[in-house]
Image (cartoon, rainbow, N blue to C red):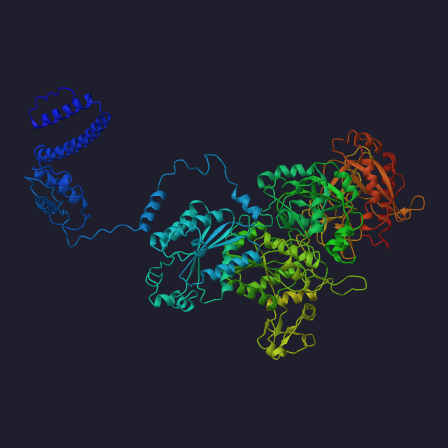
Amino acid sequence: PGGSYRTPDCGSVHLQQICFWQMDYERVRNSEDPDDERRYRQRTLQRWRVSILMSFVTGAVLSLAAYPLIFPCPSASKLCPRCPSCPALTLPNTEAIVTNAVEQAVMKCPKCPKINLPDTHAIAADAAEKAVLKCPVCKECPVAPACPDCKLECPKAPPCPVAEAPSDAQVAARYRVAMLHRPMKNILECAPGQDCRLGSNNRFSVLGQKGITLWMTGLSGSGKTTIAEALEKRLLYSLSKNVYRIDGDNLRTGLTRDLGFSPDDRAESVRRASEVAALFAEAGVVTLVTLISPYRKDRDEARRLHAKRKIPFMEVFMDVPIDVVKKRDPKGLYAKVAKGLIKNFTGIDAPYEAPEHAEVVLRNSEQPVSKCVDQLIAVLQQAGMLSGDKLVDGLPPPDGGENINLIVPADELPAKRIEAEGLAKVPLTDIDTNWLQVIGEGWAAPLRGFMREGTLIQTLHFNSILADPSNISGVGDYSYKATDWMQSQFPKQRVSMPIPIVLPITDFTRRAIEKKPAVALTNAAGIPLAILRAPEVYELRVREIISRTFGVLDDSHPYIEQLLAPGKDYAVGGEVELLGRITYNDGLDKYRLTVDELRASFKKKGADVVYAFQTRNPTHAGHAFLMKDSRQKLMQRGYKKPVLWLSPLGGWTKKSDVPLDVRVKQHHEVMAAGELHPDWTVMAIWPSPMIYAGPTEVQFHAKSRRVAGATFFTVGRDPAGMPYSSGPLKGDDLYHPDHGRYVLMSSPGVGQMQFLGFEKVYYDKKDHTMRTVDASRKRDFISISGSKMRKLAALAAKPCPPKIPSDLVKAKCIPPGFMVQRGWEIVSDYYIRQKTGDWVPFSKQLGGLQLGPNVRSSAEQPFGKAGFTAHFVAPAGGSFISPWHGIPLYPAGTTSPFEMVNFVCEIPRGSTAKLEVQKEVAYNPIMQDIKKGALRYYTYGSPFFNYGMLPQTWEDPSKGYNGTVGDNDPLDVMELGSRTCKVGEMRAVKVLGDLELIDQGELDHKILVIDAMDPLATKLKTASDLLMIMPGVTQRLVEWLKFYKTTDGKAINRLVSDAPAERARALDVIGNCHESWKALKARGAGDTGFWIG
């Protein structure tokens, strides 16, 4: 109102609406009413809402109308994307659809390589075509067609198996196989050339054992766990060996917890167990694997794994019948199988493949568990697993693990012997020689020489020594050097060494070898037997040795007497080199086998175990019973070829013991008679001397047998014992008869040696055998002690009548079966001729003494026997001549009667035998002095001069000096030249002087001479020249003459003067004694008892 209003030109409905809105807007704009604009805005908002709704409806209607024209009927594959038959169908090209469907169908068909299927291509194509035809043909598609049920299935061929989806276990198994066969490109345990592990040999040596896997297989209930547990306890608790048992239970709680019982899982379980066992065994643990492990290929794979790593592996088959294991059924599993509660049970409805080549087969249903364990222990010992050291010839190693053989090789021997000739000499007694053989042949391993002081102290206080022959500790050579009393680091391995093996020497010898780098050890003939390197001389505390070794007070004890010999106040220790093997030339050397030879002999007989039996008495049926019984016990333990080492002790023994040759010959007859069959018996002399130290000594006896390869040692009552020799207890046993055996069996350091003890055996009058007493008929048994046997032998007892008397001595008969008849005759012959026969009491070197030209001795009585005689024979005709009366004093052709004299050698330089011309024997041969039935030797030291006599001289006892008288012998001579003479050799010598010895009131001239051919002979005119030309010799001569008898317990000798008389005085003495001899020859022997021709 108030203004003009012009209606716009509106044609169409739409334009009319617009025109209406425009007019309405013009009216409101021109209105002055403020509410008109508000009302206008509300109307406008409503109009927009209606407009938007109408636009949406219009668009939807237009879309529905235009869609069929723009988008025609879609393909079945687009409408039904889940339909597998039409993955790429484009209508109307049905051929492509069919081809694609066929390809998809064929790909999904299971593979049947061995079945002749029908033409699946055509069938699949037809099925695909039919499936596609089921899709609706959409000429007009007002509504989207429903997806047809388009299932394309492979045609079913009756012979074609239906493929099953793999189980989780199969998937895991295939994955494991793939991983196990993948190349190990970046995993290296050791870089090339790098030693990233400790050497197994050193590891085993320190641990005292070797690692091995015992794979124990068999059915459930076959005894795997039971026997393994018993073996584990025996190894750990009795033998102190590190052992661990791996079984299915402790594996399935951890390492194989993810595995089931399928064949693949069983194989994997075996593989894991073998890997773990190999690691344990490589670390030196005896590893016991107790798994059923039914499949042979899996066990063989475990074996190959160990072989690849060079780890010992043994398969142990528990060969037990199925009926037995069902009856045992320790876990009740067989009962559940019988009820159908368990399927696929090994041995019932699942296979068990028994081993074809198991190292050990245990039929434990036929023997107790303890016997099975014995058998396994035996196998481990044979394989060397219970020792940290390497086997030697298939037998246990010596103490310390190293085989000791100190005999110089043949190609080095000539040079060594030449060296020895120029060295200072240390003389050996018979006992020393025995000990040298023990050391040099390795019987006291790891000892390489006579004990140094530090080694001796360990032996006395610990009955053992610390040793490390392989020098793993870095201080293994400490015992081969002079003792360092401040030493603080030692090897850790302790080996048995109960007996002190020392070389006593005198102060004279001590000073002779002082500061020398090496010395020669010589026998009684002066022949070097060995070289001792880097000698260590120390004070010999004899009383300490006696108290700690013997533990008794008995100075008349036969070996203690040797130790208490006067003058031997020092000892020398050091490592030795034997100049050839030690022989004795007594007819028994063929029975003296070295350690190496003895081991080879055991190996030749096929021994899988060696047991030793020592005796220093003849072998009677009781001994034979014990030795055969021991063999049976070993075979019951699982050994196949036990070999007996019958080892008569060969070294020094006391006088009352049966001589060595008698024992050896008697043993030989026992073997020849089949009592101890040669097929399983080796007789070999053990070279050690006997020291009669009871429980202490028997430990050494066992030790030496271990060295030679013995695993078992048969020991009886009172080993190495004897009665007291003096004092209030004389006649009583030094040691309790049961102590020796007990100490041996409980002693440390015995290694893997075991002992076969036995009780006293008696003669069974009913069965005519020696055996243990049958309690049900005690009266049928009688005792035949050693003393009774000796009495019967001395009485030349004959075989008893059928009814055996109770008092054999009174009847003077020996019961049948007590001893092999020929052996009894040998023993009886000895006791009958005990004091008159020519016996070999112990190993004592015979022969070896070099004889001069035209000197002969008897082969039956070589040097070393009391009957040794060296006769002089004429150059022509070979008749005997006297060296005292038949050889001139002065050499033929000398221009002056006093220029030179003839010297006859009695004792060569270095020889300690007291040899001299026998004045009372026809033709005055050279023989060895005898006192109280024993051959006499110099014990003071090694003579550094040739000793002999001047022929046609005699020190007349009616003449003397200052109250002394002549010694009634030819003139003694000490020849100082550099060349060693031979016994009976005659040389022209140059007289230098005279040392006048006063011995028990007799004046004994010692004429000093030198070989006329010696290089120094032209420089020496008289005795005083010795001070300049041969310094120190005169002093040593004086000392020798004064003290050489002190080691025999005699007083010090006295000289008229410590300065020798000069040449002129000596020649005067020679002339006077020559005249005395002439007078003797002229008047005859008279009551002198001399043989003067």
> Quick check: can you spot residue 440?
yes
Residue 997 sits in which quadrant? top right
Q: Does residue 1068 appear left or right of residue 977 in this picture? A: right
Q: Position of residue 565 (x, y in %)?
A: 78, 51
Q: Residue at x 83, y 54 (%)?
A: 1089
Q: Residue furthest front?
A: 2
Q: Residue furthest top?
A: 4
> Quick check: can you spot residue 841?
no
Q: Position of residue 145 (x, y in %)?
A: 11, 43
Q: Residue furthest bottom?
A: 803
Relative depth, front residue between 399 and 11: 11
Q: Is residue 205 above or below residue 42?
A: below
Relative depth, front residue between 967 and 331: 331
Q: Position of residue 9 (x, y in %)?
A: 8, 21
Relative depth, front residue between 577 and 555: 555
Q: Residue furthest left?
A: 139
Q: Does residue 59 appear left or right of residue 502 in this picture? A: left
Q: Position of residue 240 (x, y in %)?
A: 57, 54
Q: Does residue 231 appear left or right of residue 1053 in this picture? A: left
Relative depth, front residue between 325 and 568: 325
Q: Is residue 22 above or below residue 536?
A: above
Q: Quadrant of the N terminus?
A: top left
Numbered circles on residues, count: 0
Q: Does residue 811 appear left or right of residue 270 in this picture? A: right
